[in-house]
Amino acid sequence: MINAAIFASGNGSNAIELLKLEKDLRNIKFNFLVTDKKNAGIIEKAKKFNKDVYLFEKENNKLEHERKILNKLKSENIEWIFLAGYMRILSSDFINHFYNDYLDQAKIINIHPSLLPDFKGKNAYEQAFNAKVNHSGVSIHFVDAGIDTGELITQKELPLIKGESLENFKKRGLKLEHELYPKVVKNIDKFIETKCKEDIYEI
Ligand code: GRF
């Protein structure tokens, strides 16, 4: 049984898609939800799942902030973290606490709304839209100390439709995110077993 946490800062729509899986999966429990924003969508949305969300608001001292989160995660025996629109960059110190020798990765996974390594960082849909690319996509990757630089697990392309608005593009992108992230979680045993070392998983 994987004892996992979800970290979310925004609307929480990806976090909810992961929570919906719990009833059908025997191998994973999302026992710990974290946000850094007191108005984060996940706080309200998680109530439907009878889950509390722990609020750790930003502090000037980043290491202190992370230490508080870490202490709680340790006391809850959390092994895996799924980032779902969490808007803080985790320090290498924090990430190293989740490093797993067998995987040669930290057990922290993120979803990013572009075909990495293109359009890292914030507002990736806007970045891709403004760059007028033919297609962008969604990536799921391990988290390392860089910004959206960790090893890829899977990617799915999202073509831009000629003449569509940014809003429409984002809406379609989010729909793809909601399909892809649960698939990764459902396949997590497979990723662990194969050490996530195949090029990029087609799922
Ligand atoms: C998503 O586009 C995610 O890929 C990005 O932030 C957004 C969060 O959306 N990292 P939500 O909070 O899950 O609705």
Image: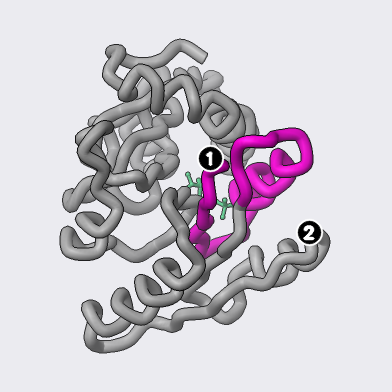
Disc 1 secondary structure class = helix
- Whether 25 is among the magenta residues is yes
Q: Amino acid at mark 1?
A: Leu
Quarter where residue 26 is shown:
top right
What is the magenta range? 1-29
CA neighbours of label 2 inside 10 A, class few (<14), some (14 to 19), many (20+): few
* Label number found at residue 83: none
Q: Left or right of 62: which side holds 168?
A: right
Quarter where residue 33 is shown:
bottom right
Picture layout, residue 83 above or below residue 199: below
Residue drawn at x 39%, y 62% is 87
Picture layout, residue 85 above or below residue 166: below
Q: Amino acid at mark 2?
A: Phe
Q: Left or right of 92: which side holds 133?
A: right
Residue 139 visible to the viewer: yes
Quarter where residue 199 is shown:
top left
Residue 32's x, y, as percent?
A: 57, 63
Residue 172 visible to the viewer: no
CA neighbours of label 1 inside 10 A, class few (<14), some (14 to 19), many (20+): some
Q: Left or right of 16: which side holds 141?
A: left
Q: Which residue is under mark 2?
A: 49
Which of the two labelled residues, at mark 2 and mark 1, occupies the earlier sequence position? 2
**Is ligand 1 within 8 Å of the beta carbon of the residue shown at mark 1?**
no
Residue 196's x, y, as percent?
A: 33, 23
Q: Which residue is under mark 1?
A: 166
Q: Which is more foreground, mark 2 or mark 1?
A: 2
Residue drawn at x 25%, y 63% is 94
